[in-house]
Image (cartoon, rainbow, N blue to C red):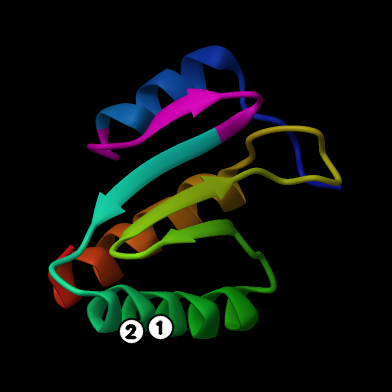
Amino acid sequence: MADLLTEEQVTDALTRLPGWRTADEALYREVQFASFPEAIQAVNRIAEIAENDNHHPDIDIRWRTLIFRCSTHSAGGITAADVSLAGEIDAVVESTGG
């Protein structure tokens, strides 16, 4: 099982993850895209990354707005895998116009 990050480690990670916040033992980010197809393109790319990493975010799709939630359910909170996935999500968001 992955080790939970300390509050200090999470705070430090958030300095490198602009737009992310914590709530309910998870990392959250909301992103608005210019169009619904752009949002779905981002979801598809993130799905491929998540499958490759075998670590999957919760994604809420609301027209052009995506809400990402990263938490390691088996560990009961935020782990290094969640921080890494958040960074990968950021890269996709940047490249797809979010």
Task: Name the residue rendered at 53%, 79% in the picture.
Answer: 47
Q: Residues within 10 Å of mark 2 (few under 14, many from 20)?
A: some
Dot 1 and dot 2 residues touching (CB under 8 Å): yes
Task: Name the residue rendered at 69%, 73% in the picture.
Answer: 54
Q: Is residue 10 left or right of residue 5?
A: left
Foreground of the two, 55 or 34: 34
Q: Position of residue 37 (x, y in %)?
A: 27, 84
Classify 75 as above or below 25: below
Dominant SS in magenta: loop
Q: Which residue is at the far top?
A: 8
Distance between the alpha carbons at the discs numbered 1 and 2: 6 Å
Classify 4 as above or below 83: above
Q: Is residue 17 magenta?
A: yes
The C terminus - image quarter? bottom left
Which mark is drawn over residue 98?
none
Residue 23: image quadrant is top right
Classify 47 as above or below 86: below
Q: Is residue 15 left or right of residue 85?
A: left
Local SS, label 1 = helix
Q: Which residues are magenta?
A: 16-26
Q: Which residue is mark 1?
A: 45
Amino acid type for the residue under numbered disc 1: Arg
Amino acid type for the residue under numbered disc 2: Gln
Q: Position of residue 11 (x, y in %)?
A: 41, 19
Residue 64: image quadrant is bottom left
Foreground of the two, 35 or 73: 35
- Closer to the observer: label 1 or label 2? 2
Q: Position of residue 19 (x, y in %)?
A: 26, 37
Task: Name the residue rendered at 37%, 62% in the picture.
Answer: 89
Q: Which residue is mark 2?
A: 41
Q: Position of residue 74 (x, y in %)?
A: 86, 46
